[in-house]
Amino acid sequence: MSRTIVVTGSTSGIGLGIARAFAAEGANVVINGFGPPDAIEATRRELEALAGGPAGGKVLYHAADMAKPDEITDLIETAAGTFGTVDVLINNAGIQHVAKIEEFPAEKWDLLIAVLLSSAFHTMRNAIPLMKQAGKGRIINVASAHALIASPYKSAYVAAKHGILGLTKTAALELAEFGITVNAICPGYVLTPLVEKQIPDTARERGISEAQVKSEVMLRLQATKEFVSIDEVAQTAIFLASDAARSITGTHISIDGGWTAQ
Ligand code: NAD
């Protein structure tokens, strides 16, 4: 029987890559995120074709705003109502805002904390009873190298990402005896729309060119001097969701080209 995977923020970037990797394994996948309805429907169909057509997994789109707890509850209830349960929960939705703390808009702070941190609490709160009932489950939080170290001008992002590692460890301890693992993936820089969008702001804050942002800010500490690929993150999620990873819980896997080794 197909497993059911919920991936928040999967209309783009890393989340879409993770949704694709699970669809390729024939899973039922619930995708979520913003975007033009036509493009989202095209993505849903593409993923469903990958999942194997009528005999394989199905792909459902749910438009929940990850800043809104009621909509998050509806996302998990809809996934369980459609496919029976949630086997793998991937908390991935994300946004960024780059500014000095004293100029950081308070409403942006609240939004980043809601989308990057509180949303994972709400998805987990709703999905854990389903996983306990099934006696198994996998929760994977897409954190960041910024869960381990800081960069200036990213106060809300760094605070939320550090927070999600704490949530990951706490949930792992609470769920360890129920066949449910909880882990985080900490990527370095991956060239997705989220990263592309912050390049002009970072250039402005630091008074450097956009090319310098890539070479002197983003890849300066990434020892490989290369961006991480979406597929590397997706395949790590596949591994963490596999039976081979059943004793890995309450920890993180860094995929950062050596950034946090320094
Ligand atoms: P992205 O911008 O390509 O994708 C973000 C996704 O989240 C999109 O589908 C978007 O629609 C969705 N989203 C944003 N706000 C939402 C909301 N309120 N409700 C529902 N969906 C929402 O970004 P990405 O780079 O793929 O980032 C995905 C995750 O990976 C984020 O948590 C990010 O912090 C993390 N991450 C990214 C990088 C990187 O370098 N790109 C590095 C480390 C960690």
Image: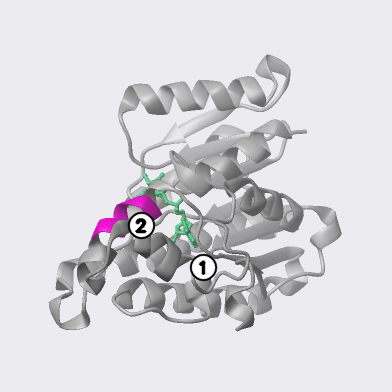
Q: Is residue 209 left or right of residue 232?
A: left
Is 100 situated above or below 76?
Answer: below
- Toward the top, the furthest residue is 54
Tell me the amino acid under the disc marked 1.
Ser
State which mark lies toward you, 1 or 2: 2
Is 124 covered by the magenta stretch?
Answer: no
| Residue where numbered disc 1 is placed | 144
Task: Where is residue 177? Give x, y as percent.
Answer: 76, 72
Q: Report the front residue among 86 and 104.
A: 104
- Nearest the eye: 207 or 193: 207
Residue 43 drawn at (x, y percent) = 48, 27
Q: CA distance from mark 1 to mark 2?
A: 22 Å
Q: Is the shortest distance between ligand 1 and the CB of mark 1 under 8 Å?
A: yes
Q: Could you say which quadrant of the image residue 107 lies in? A: bottom left
Q: Main secondary structure of the magenta part?
A: helix
Quadrant, the C terminus: bottom right
Give the amino acid type for the residue marked by disc 2 in the picture: Ala
**Who's the residue at 44% across and 63% down the image?**
215
Using the rendered image of the protein, determine whether residue 133 is visible from the camera's viewpoint.
no
Relative to 204, 232 lies left or right: right
Looking at the rendered structure, the secondary structure element under dot 2 is helix
Q: Which residues are magenta?
A: 195-200
Dot 2 corresponds to which residue? 211
Looking at the image, is 89 positioned above or below residue 155? above
Say which element carries label 1: loop
91 vs 71, left or right, is: right
Residue at image position (54%, 56%) is 227
Q: Residue at x 50, y 61 (%)?
A: 189
In this rendering, is residue 194 above or below 54? Answer: below
Q: Residue at x 32, y 26 (%)?
A: 37
| Image coordinates for residue 259, horizontal then vertical, percent | 58, 74
